[in-house]
Amino acid sequence: MLTGERSVSQTGIDAVALKPKECDVRMALETPFDTVAIDYEGREHLPDADVLRELADDREVRLTTPVRADGFDPTGDDELWEWIPEGVRRVLVAGHAAYLTESEAGRAVSPRLAAGIERAPDAWVGTEGIERVALAVGGTQYELLSRRTESNLRALRATGYDGEIAVYAPTVLSDDEDEILDAVGAYAARRRPVAKALPEGAETDSNAVDRARDVLGAAVRDYALVGSVEHVREQVSALKEAGADVIVGYPARGVEEFVE
């Protein structure tokens, strides 16, 4: 739990993202955020409908919806569209391959996103790997923080794009390098430019040394919001000045870090 100047409410972050595989998503009610985004980690980890209703009674809830997955496919098997309680909004995504069968992963993304946004016009649209498709279908653009995010935001705004943009960022409210690497080192290491730069077989947490530690030390600052509350507030301000409307923080060290 954070208090005073260490409070997450002082960072400028607008919403919290939670992973149901990691925590009871009802913990969102103990955070200072009015909006909670719930990640998809496979059907076995979907929160109960009653839990979603409880959250939606008090918060804006956005449930990640993988449009290629059985049950969530707005052009085919859509039984879970009706299962999602009224009042729970959606984050439409292509779906991570780790949570899709081979058949699901082979389905076309574009028509499913288009059908999804038609059925849920207020949905956010996840942009990872499908930026042009996501932009074409409309809706709030929901992108992962990266080293290019600020420049991409400025470029979009410069072209006259006036739609809403939300940015997702793993967050660590600590200056301790070991704590940062333990929380988001492996996450940053999965990003393609980082994976290419890392020595083969390198540790990606606080055990990283030499070149691996140097690479990861820079990467975690490209792909996550890390540091003191004041420093994270500066990063959030920079993103908003570049054109972001909503910053969604994922508490990479556990939801307790966002509880007030």
Image: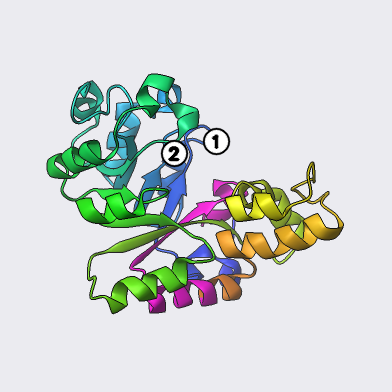
Circle 2 sits in a helix, a strand or a loop, which is it?
A: helix
Q: Which residue is drawn at 72% across and 49% down?
A: 182
Q: Tell whether 162 sits left or right of 221.
A: left
Kindly indicate the quadrant of the structure image that contains residue 94: top left
Residue 256 point in image, percent of width and height? 57, 49
Task: Indicate the secondary structure of the residue bearing disc 1.
Answer: loop
Residue under label 1, please give it.
22
Question: In which quadrant of the rendered view does residue 44 lie?
Answer: top left
Residue 198 location (% of width, % of height): 74, 52
Q: Can residue 59 be seen in this view?
A: no
Q: Which labelled disc corresponds to residue 25?
A: 2
Taking 75 as reference, is 248 above or below it? below
Residue 258 sits inside the magenta stretch: yes
Q: Over which residues does the magenta segment extend?
A: 234-260
Q: Which mark is residue 30?
A: none
Give the residue drawn at x 21%, y 50%: 137
Q: Residue at 25% across / 28% down in the picture?
A: 73
Q: Is residue 170 above or below residue 234?
A: above
Q: Which of 190 and 121 is in front in this view?
A: 190
